[in-house]
Amino acid sequence: AHGFAVGLQLSGVEGPLAFWQQELYSDFDPADVLAGECRALLDRLFASVFAETASSNEGFSLFLPEDLVVDAQRLAAVRDWCQGFLYGIGLGGDAVIKQASPQMRDLLRDITEITRLATDDVDNSSENQSALIEIEEYLRVGVLLLREERSNGKEANDS
């Protein structure tokens, strides 16, 4: 969900909250108390992502499990984050890709490759932990750069 919200933010799509609600809440039972609590948490996540701006990038991080253990759960979380991110970006249509610099297009291709990450038969070696840290940092910095690029492009279009 975090990747989806960040992708929506960067896509520039009109009415991102409507897309968010349609995609995440369509199967929620309004009478289910736990679903209501889940929705409240997801709404806070959405609001926090949209409160972040290019000037508040210092605290940005991917919303992933805290423990750095290379296992199927952690790899699936990284893969799912990337899938959500690309889905959110994709809702903006071709405009995001057309306006992106060649480096950002490469980043989006790399993120697409990460969505193909195999999650079975992984070992929690220090080498794999280092590789996972590098991948997550690459994603984090790449998203920050894309956010900055999109922000600068929007400011140029507004003026």
Image (tube, grey):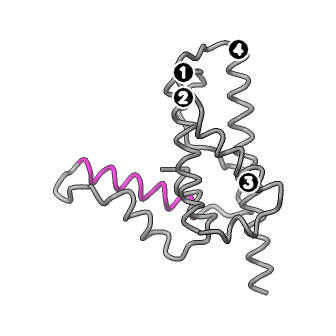
User: Callout 3: helix, strand or loop?
Assistant: helix
Question: Disc 3 marks which amino acid?
Answer: Leu
Residue at numbered disc 4: 126
Question: Disc 2 marks which amino acid?
Answer: Arg
Inter-mark Cα distance, 2 to 4: 15 Å
Q: Which mark is residue 74?
A: 2
Taking the spot 55% from the left edge, 37% from the top edge, the residue there is 64
Dot 1, crowdedness within 10 Å: few (<14), some or many (≥20)? some
**Which is more toward the observer, 16 or 65?**
16
Mark sitting earlier along the chain (2/4) = 2
Inter-mark Cα distance, 3 to 4: 27 Å
Question: Disc 1 marks which amino acid?
Answer: Asp
Mark sitting earlier along the chain (4/1) = 1
Mark sitting earlier along the chain (3/2) = 2
User: Callout 1: helix, strand or loop?
Assistant: loop
Percent coordinates x, y for residue 113 in the rendering: 66, 40
Is 138 on the left or on the right of 62, as rendered?
right
In what quadrant of the picture does the C terminus appear? bottom right
Percent coordinates x, y for residue 26 in the rendering: 30, 60
Dot 3, crowdedness within 10 Å: few (<14), some or many (≥20)? some
User: Callout 4: helix, strand or loop?
Assistant: helix
* Chief secondary structure of the magenta portion: helix
Do the CB atoms of the residues marked 1 and 3 lie less than 8 Å apart? no
Residue at numbered disc 1: 71
Mark sitting earlier along the chain (3/4) = 4
Do the CB atoms of the residues marked 2 and 1 lie less than 8 Å apart? yes
Is 44 on the left or on the right of 144, as rendered?
left
Taking the spot 80% from the left edge, 80% from the top edge, the residue there is 156
Residue at numbered disc 3: 144
Inter-mark Cα distance, 1 to 3: 26 Å
